[in-house]
Amino acid sequence: MESGTPGGSGPAEPGPRLRGLGGALQAAWASLLSGAQAQAQAEGGCCAPAVAAVLPAGGSGERMGVPTPKQFCPILERPLISYTLQALERVRWIKDIVVAVTGGNMEAMKGIIQRYQHKRISLVEAGVTRHRSIFNGLKALAESQPNSRLSRPEVVIIHDAVRPFVEEDVLLKVVTAAKEHGAAGAIRPLVSTVISPSSDGCLDHSLDRTKHRASEMPQAFLFDVIYEAYQQCSDYDLEFGTECLQLALKYCHVKAKLVEGSPDLWKVTYKRDLYAAESIIKERISQQMCVVMDTKEDEEHVGRCLEEMLKNELNHVKVMSGRDLQQVILEQCYNFVCVNVMTSDFEKTQKLLNVLDESNLSILYPVVVISVHFLDNKSIPFGRKMEDLMQIKELAREVKKRNILLCGLLIYYPQDEQKLQESLRQGATIIATLIKERDSGLIGQLLIA
Ligand SMILES: Nc1ccn([C@@H]2O[C@H](COP(=O)(O)OP(=O)(O)OP(=O)(O)O)[C@@H](O)[C@H]2O)c(=O)n1
Ligand SMILES: O=C(CO)[C@H](O)[C@H](O)COP(=O)(O)O
């Protein structure tokens, strides 16, 4: 499927994502196209209905209990909202992304857009409640100004800026359903039972959990439906309402289609949610690693053994040859192991760092590079080897500025094959831990296996 249509989104992203839509979803998208549009697409012309997204990001995050509003809290040194923007902008059929932020955070938001190279973003002033922020975003789409790049879409997605793990498949499902039903939203099964207390603080009644669902985001609407609902709705709704689907029902009599969402759609609300989000991101970017090594015979044996051990350590991890580094980088691999069997200098590691530098790979995620060296006590005396390897500290300090986390690993290389296997196993465990943990405290350290 071509880029610019659903399923044709940008380069591979870490984590579970849509790599080409399944038949059912493709069919769903085909049905989304009106007859005239489908014909135009068949003739190679315009394809899908215009879809835009509105992201409310004007809250103060009281429940998080930290001074920084949660959408700007860093995860792996990047603000949370940048992950959400990345998730939406990689879906190329979303034409415009309107973000509502407070006046006080406008400049900070512009800085984030610039630093992380976000595209197709327009900013509007947030309101004092979530509904008012969303309304401001919708107004910007409805009343396009002469110098604005925005235009009124056919379908609009509403998604909280603090739900970073939204995937293309659920976006497509809600957009498709909104086109058919006027409104649609993601739901999840309830985790806890909902009860109703009486005024004396005692249980009045409890709801049957099987009959209720938690309403999550994303939601999607025919633009005219949700805009009309916001224009009609009362001040009370704008002040205290929490559910956009309810506005469509109450003011436009549109019954939203409910779509089952994934557990990752939850809203970052409390501090613990930031830790959970960080763990998910770390897990996603630790899925594959590239082992860079020469093919010289003497290096190959030990390198291949290490590679095998790594495959054991990191289940489901793709170990790739470093021969085609550019390709590996294109595939967005964020973990590199540079194997130096015969040397104690950083020439090969430095070459790798140069390639990474040119690629801009580390703009969005910290890239882990582990420079592996071997100690056989024969070719170079231990003291001199250590002296050479201590240069890693300086090198690591330099590349940290570019979000590359460099560590050194010295693996004992005895003549005895069994002992060699043991130290390689230990080396593989250390490498796996460094990749999974991405602990910046270990940057520039020389670990020994
Ligand atoms: N006046 C507001 C309030 C909230 N939001 C946004 O709506 C989304 C979901 O709201 P919520 O989780 O309640 O965020 P906060 O209001 O920031 O959190 P809290 O209720 O804990 O203060 C967030 O992206 C938040 O930034 C907004 O755009 N404008
Ligand atoms: O899940 C949602 C359903 O629309 C909203 O994100 C949620 O209701 C927002 O409410 P609040 O701002 O009170 O957390």
Image: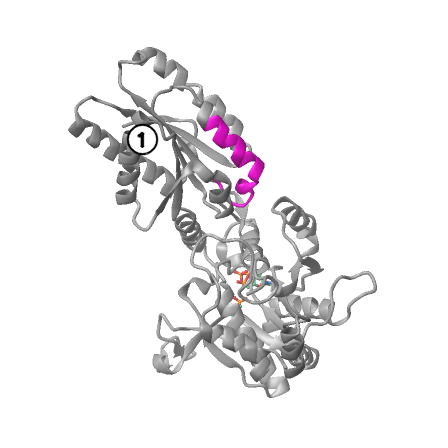
* Residue 369 in the figure: left or right of residue 69: left
User: In the image as oriented, which residue stretches furthest toward the bottom?
Assistant: 253
Please report the bounds of the magenta region as a residue range.
Answer: 349-366
Q: Quadrant of residue 358?
A: top right
Let me know if residue 152 is in the magenta part: no
Relative to 37, say whether 104 is above or below.
above
Q: Position of residue 360 (x, y in %)?
A: 57, 40
Q: Name the residue located 42 percent from the left edge and 19 percent from the top edge.
A: 345
Colouring scheme, one of rainbow, by chain, secondary structure, one colour? one colour
Nearest to the observer: residue 66 or residue 93: 93
The residue under label 1 is 300
Q: Position of residue 330 (x, y in %)?
A: 51, 46
Q: Is mark 1 within 8 Å of ligand 1?
A: no
Q: Quadrant of ligand 1?
A: bottom right
SS of the residue under disc 1: helix
Nearest to the observer: residue 40 or residue 159: 40
Q: Name the residue located 40 percent from the left edge and 16 percent from the top edge.
A: 388
Quadrant location of the C terminus? top left
Residue 69 appears in the rendering? no
Q: Amino acid at mark 1?
A: Glu
Q: Name the residue located 55 percent from the left edge and 65 percent from the top edge.
A: 1
Q: Position of residue 401 (x, y in %)?
A: 55, 32
Relative to 347, say whether 137 is above or below.
below
